Image: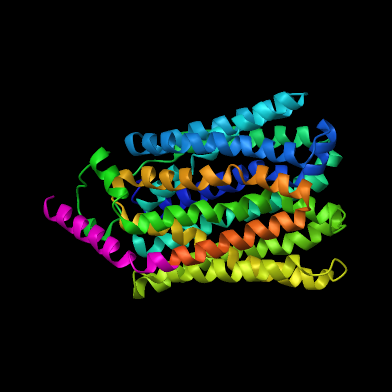
Amino acid sequence: MSPENSRYRWFVVVVFFFFILLHQTDKLMIGSLQVQISEDFQINNTQWGLVNSGALIVATILYPVWGYLYDRYARAKLLGIASFIWGATTWLNAIVRTFGGFLATRASTGIDDSSYPGVYTLIADYFGPNLRGKIYGILQLAQPLGYLLGTILALMVAPAIGGWRNVFFITGGLGIVIAVLIFFFVKDMPRGKAEPEFENMPEMQTFKFSWAEVKEIFKKKTMWFIFLQGFAGVFPWTVITYFFFGYLETERGYDADGILFTMAPVILILAGSYFLGGFLGDLAFKRTNKGRIIVSSIGVLMGAIFMYFALNTPIEAQNQFFIFMCLTAIFMALSSPNVIATVYDVTVPEIRSTAQATSYFIENAGAAFAPIITGVIADAIDLKTAILLICTIAWGLCFFLYLGAIFTIDKDANDLRNQMAERAKGM
């Protein structure tokens, strides 16, 4: 089936959806296993933070490498290799028996965590600008669904099959299966194929990676606002991922069933927030270049407000806490698909993986230390204070940075469209 075929491109979306779903299940499941693993290795919150920071640091270092490789070589083949690495490193993490070995192998799982720019840039060459937000929303709703699936595996399946190590063997094996599927059945597309200026052209010029175009990334003011908000914005996600289940268990007194029945609806609402964000972003983008930024700014502001109310809810008011967490979930993911789409709204096709990888590098450069910072604050005060401080301050900063991007996006987006039009004339 031809890559240009409409049915085939949706097949690619389905494959990448399951790649993200199962990879996020494997990656995020560890948050739900905090108490089990901490008891197994006899470690405290600070050491637990170090375990999770290790993988984030490795991923951060490798983002520029993956971005460069994706812009130079076949993205589908590289994604197949990344999926194989996911499976192999997860198996290693399950095998080791000492805390030092667990720390090292957990860090190695970060190698494939920085592989996502290949997914989103390849999708950008299957779908045009007016559809990308929704497609990214569909793909990203796999992240919280993976979180939910990981929670179920951790809290219900792991105890039934002999512990957390056996669950890691399962998710690692699924990584190998997905690797085969991507490597042999997903096809690359010419970079820039889905740009509107090249629509219906019988032949597509090959746009090759250029260091000169990479330098142009840093000349776009919108990208600087994207970089900075990303640095701040990943802090809350990192803290929630690795500490929130421990907070519910140790400070709010929830048992495994209580955690699952409270957080499962919240995570499902969060999943819907990704698609809602992409849908609203595309809708607003059709009216104005500022549309995606406006949707993103509303999301982070309202997310911070409702998280504040949730964490300050009395422990005995479980229904009130649940309502505020659901409201937080509605808003907190609105910005995610729009940030990715905005990067592609202002950068040329042949360096988009590098642009996105640079954004992720800057994000993770800060977020890699979020678990350690959270662990230190939690040990000194409590988890509630650590989560509250990091979430509200970080999302507040993101709101003001999005306001800055509103004033720069028009020029940068129009510059790209003019550049694409010039290229189309020369073909």
| Tally of numbered discs | 0
Q: Quadrant of residue 283?
A: bottom left
Q: Quadrant of residue 251?
A: bottom right
Q: Residue furthest bottom?
A: 287
As drawn, is 102 to the left or to the right of 76? right
**Where is residue 150 shown, x and y percent of the image?**
71, 47
Is residue 91 visible in the rendered image? The answer is no
* Quadrant placement of the N terminus: top left
Decide whether the magenta segment is chiefly helix, strand or loop: helix
**Where is residue 348 shown, x and y percent of the image?**
28, 50
Name the residue at 69% across, 48% down.
374
Q: Identify whether 248 is placed above or below 85.
A: below
Name the residue at 79% across, 70% down.
313
Q: Quadrant of residue 425?
A: bottom left
115 falls in the magenta region: no
Q: Nearer the viewer, residue 230 or 108?
A: 230
Q: Nearer the viewer, residue 164 or 102?
A: 102
Q: Magenta region: which residues? A: 403-427
Q: Identify whether 323 is placed above or below 18.
A: below
Is residue 229 visible in the rendered image? The answer is yes
**Where is residue 310 shown, x and y percent of the image?**
73, 68
**Where is residue 162 shown, x and y percent of the image?**
85, 34
419 falls in the magenta region: yes
Q: Identify whether 109 is placed above or below 119.
A: above
Q: Residue furthest front?
A: 380
As drawn, is 228 to the left or to the right of 48? left
Name the residue at 45% across, 54% down.
228
